[in-house]
Image (spheres, grey):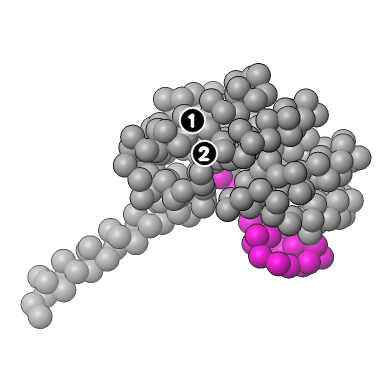
């Protein structure tokens, strides 16, 4: 194999790796600016994906109310259409709300027309339910490409990512989740960053997913990490 061919193959490999990084790594800014976290190490944003879910969201809201902590919920449009009162309750209790598409697809695999439908329809579903504008968006799996970022911007939304994710969609205990969160928050603090924590109050395959360990982990976390300023990603939006 000639050196030219080898160089070409290597270049293609590097380009593919760079695209995969830009499309999937949560802190990558290559395809456009996203909100990850602020520069105050004591700030933590609790964010919850895949709701509203009647099997877990009410219990989570009770925990947050007990501690007077405001969180952010990224809601799936089709679940909002099935559970509009629960979506409205989240908003009524003072939490920030973003959209998480209609059906939770991997947006990087879709044509732009479908991307626009997934994001725009979910924004409308949530706004219809809560009676207020929705200005935050989180792509499922964190997957994005330029078209995803462009559509979100055109719809007036900021794309929100994270720097702390702990796999709570798997069957693990609250104590295990807590340990993972504490480790990642400590790492972010050492780097001089705040933390944007991803947990789940629902499951994207359907309503009724068990997320009680995530709810318990939230309760433990709020009590355990002292000196924390609990914020929402809106605080980190730059003009």
- What residue is shown at x 49% (from left), y 24% (from top)? 156
Horizontal and vertical percent for residue 60? Answer: 80, 45
Q: Nearer the viewer, residue 180 or 94?
A: 94
Task: In the rendered view, tell whether residue 47 sits above or below residue 136.
Answer: below
Horizontal and vertical percent for residue 172? Answer: 73, 67
Disc 1 designates what residue?
Answer: 121
Quadrant in which residue 111 is drawn: top left
- Compared across the picture, whether 114 is left or right of 44 comes to left
- What residue is shown at x 39% (from left), y 38% (from top)? 115
The reply to whether dot 1 and dot 2 touch (C-beta < 8 Å) is: yes
**What range is drawn magenta here?**
161-185
- Packing grade of label 1 (10 A; few <14, some 14-19, many >=20) is some
Q: Earlier in the sequence, mark 1 or mark 2?
A: 2
- What residue is shown at x 47% (from left), y 29% (from top)? 120
Horizontal and vertical percent for residue 13? Answer: 27, 66
- What residue is shown at x 53% (from left), y 33% (from top)? 122
Quarter of the image where the C terminus is located: top right
Dot 1 falls on a residue whose secondary structure is helix
Residue closest to the far bottom: 1
Task: In the rendered view, tell whether residue 52 sits above or below residue 204.
Answer: above
Quadrant in which residue 61 is drawn: top right
Give the distance between the C-alpha atoms of the residues marked 1 and 2, in whole angstroms.
7 Å
**The disc label shown at residue 102, or none:** 2
- Compared across the picture, whether 121 is left or right of 31 comes to right
**The disc label shown at residue 53, or none:** none
Quadrant in which residue 64 is drawn: top right
Q: Nearer the viewer, residue 50 or 223?
A: 50
- Compared across the picture, whether 197 is left or right of 173 comes to left
Q: In this view of the protein, can residue 188 be seen by the observer?
A: no
Q: Nearer the viewer, residue 192 or 135?
A: 135
């Amino acid at each position: 194999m000639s050196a030219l061919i080898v160089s070409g193959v290597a270049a293609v490999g590097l380009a593919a790796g760079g695209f995969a990084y830009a499309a999937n790594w949560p802190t990558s800014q290559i395809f456009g600016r996203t909100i990850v976290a602020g520069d105050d190490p004591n700030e933590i944003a609790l964010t919850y994906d895949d709701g509203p879910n009647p099997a877990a969201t009410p219990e989570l809201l009770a925990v947050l109310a007990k501690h007077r902590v405001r969180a952010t919920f990224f809601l799936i449009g089709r679940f909002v259409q099935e559970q509009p009162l629960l979506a409205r309750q989240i908003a009524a209790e003072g939490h920030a709300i973003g959209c998480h598409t209609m059906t939770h697809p991997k947006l990087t695999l879709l044509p732009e027309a479908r991307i626009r439908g997934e994001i725009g329809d979910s924004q409308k579903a949530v706004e219809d339910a809560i009676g207020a504008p929705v200005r935050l968006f989180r792509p499922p799996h964190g997957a994005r490409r330029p078209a995803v970022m462009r559509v979100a911007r055109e719809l007036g939304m900021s794309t929100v990512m994270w720097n702390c994710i702990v796999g709570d969609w798997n069957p693990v205990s609250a104590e295990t989740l807590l340990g993972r969160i504490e480790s990642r928050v400590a790492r972010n603090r050492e780097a001089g960053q705040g933390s944007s924590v991803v947990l789940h109050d629902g499951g994207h395959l359907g309503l009724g997913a068990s997320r009680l360990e995530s709810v318990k982990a939230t309760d433990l976390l709020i009590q355990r990490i002292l000196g924390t300023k609990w914020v929402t990603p809106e605080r980190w939006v730059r003009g």
